[in-house]
């Protein structure tokens, strides 16, 4: 049902993941140049030119968002809702790994010398995964309640 606590958890996770599309995820310093890392790719900090595109990250983010919406509106089949939420947690963790790999690869492509730093929005998938886990627990409690009532009849 849409008025349950798991829906609040899932909506908060949806909002956090959606914010990744607009917030910068990190900075890359290659030599003397500063680059900004976003979901759309690596941008030169001074002139804003795209240096490297990040289409795989955009695709992963889109899959996470669509799956999150399917989880929210799939409340009629709670078992499937829990399975999709577990799968979405795995995709979120995969997104983090892909982001780290992308930054590491971008640093090598930009010259290899330098470093990178991540910003707070890159922790949003971790928080969203925790919120999904809390939703899974709440959905499981609802399913157990429904099954116990069915046994009484």
Image (spheres, helix red, strand yellow):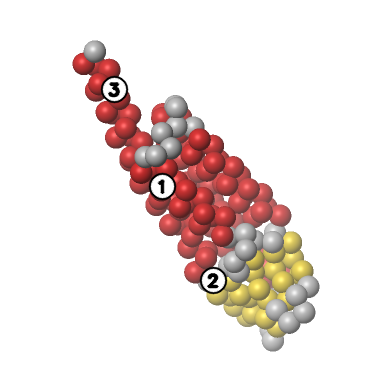
Q: Position of residue 94 (x, y in %)?
A: 54, 51
Does residue 18 appear anywhere in the picture? yes
Q: CA distance from mark 3 to mark 1?
A: 23 Å
Q: Position of residue 65 (x, y in %)?
A: 57, 47
For disc 3, the neighbor class at 10 Å (few under 14, some 14 to 19, many from 20) is few
Q: Is residue 6 left or right of residue 25?
A: left
For disc 2, the neighbor class at 10 Å (few under 14, some 14 to 19, many from 20) is some
| Residue marked by disc 2 | 118
- Say the numbered circle drawn on residue 43: none
Identify the element where label 2 is drawn.
strand
- Say which residue appears at 37% left-offset and 40% top-offset: 4
- Say which residue appears at 55% left-offset and 75% top-offset: 117
- Say the numbered circle drawn on residue 147: 3
| Residue marked by disc 1 | 8
- Labels 1, 2: front one: 1
Asked which quadrant contains residue 34, the reply is bottom right
């Amino acid at each position: 049902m849409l008025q349950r606590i798991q829906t609040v958890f899932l909506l908060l996770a949806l909002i956090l993941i959606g914010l990744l599309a607009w917030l910068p995820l990190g900075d890359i310093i290659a030599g003397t140049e500063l680059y900004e890392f976003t979901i759309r790719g690596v941008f030169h900090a001074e002139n804003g030119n795209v240096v490297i595109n990040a289409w795989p990250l955009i695709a992963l983010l889109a899959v996470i968002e669509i799956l999150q919406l399917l989880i929210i509106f799939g409340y009629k089949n709670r078992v499937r809702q829990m399975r999709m939420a577990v799968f979405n947690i795995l995709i979120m963790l995969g997104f983090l790994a892909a982001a780290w790999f992308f930054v590491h690869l971008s640093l090598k492509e930009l010259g290899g010398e330098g470093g990178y730093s991540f910003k707070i929005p890159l922790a949003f998938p971790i928080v969203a995964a925790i919120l999904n886990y809390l939703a899974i627990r709440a959905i499981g409690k609802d399913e157990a309640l429904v099954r116990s009532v069915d046994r009484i009849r």
